[in-house]
Amino acid sequence: MAIKLTPIDVVDDISREDFIKNYLNPRRPLVIRKMAQKWPAFEKWTFDYLKEVVGDKTVPLYDSSKADPSKPINASAAEMKFADYIDLIQKEPTDLRIFLFDPIKHAPRLLEDYRAPKELMGGFLDSYPNMFFGGQGSVTFLHYDIDLAHIFHTHFHGRKHIMLFDYKWRERLYCIPFATYALEDYDIEKPDFDKFPALDGIEGVEAFLEHGDTLFMPTGMWHWMKYLDGSFSISLRAWDKSLAVKAKSLYNLTVQRKFDDIMKKNFSVKYMNWKEQLAIKRAEKAMRLGKP
């Protein structure tokens, strides 16, 4: 019994033609080693430099505990001064992470330090891209991004373990209905196949990112990430050209999210229990039918 993982393709650089033909159009992940080496950020973005420009900001922190159904999605576990958090992740392991915080918005000069890879594709979003920070051992739970954008995820100052799964495996991954994340009761690194048999035989890809590596994640890709060192990343997002993908993104951001928020507010634990049981039933049905 096992999850089948193969390495993500790795290149130093890539031409636009090669990228579009072999990765963008077929929606295959790729690691580009040297893309960020052309950025000022490659050497400039040290922990000390980021502390200097946004160290006084108070930031929300997230841990590895299971989401509380009585609280809004993305409710934080704690708060801390950004500089204090950077000191923490350099000093010791912690499961505390930062996401949905944008240092660039607070320090616009950071905009000069990176470049969206427009030589590879168009459609880039975000005037102020999000950055993500994690302590050694912290984990980003298995999920896909609600807006279904393509993502160029560049890592800094440490190592990060990545697992990706195609969107077609969502039911076998125990996707929570009306949400974009998986059941949080299993560990994708060491799954209990007796309790979660639908995970047996699913196929994914993995990579280990180091300083300056850029991961291309196609639209809808499920991803799990583990910080092997205290480190950080930046994600640059771009639209897929497909009108169907854009329509699904709009649906996710409006109808699905609004419905889920209303149900959580009114039915809380009962609604969450129903969703989790439905995720299990769908996963087991998909397994019996041999899906995807």
Image: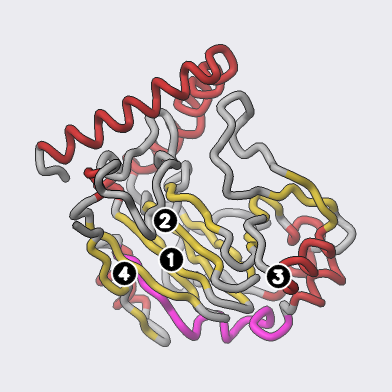
**Element type at mark 1:** strand
Q: Report which residue position mark 4 lands on.
A: 20
Q: Position of residue 254 (x, y in %)?
A: 50, 28
- Disc 3 from disc 1: Cα separation: 21 Å
Name the N-terminal-most of marks 1 and 4: 4
Name the N-terminal-most of marks 3 and 4: 4
Name the N-terminal-most of marks 3 and 1: 3
Q: Report which residue position mark 1 lands on.
A: 162
Q: Nearer the viewer, residue 138 or 178?
A: 138
Residue that lies at the very extreme toward the top in this rendered image: 266
Left-right relation of 265 to 179: right
**Element type at mark 2:** strand
Left-right relation of 288 to 225: left
Q: Report which residue position mark 2 lands on.
A: 223
Tell me where residue 286 sits by quadrant. Answer: top left
Residue 157 to residue 233: above or below: below
Left-right relation of 34 to 158: left
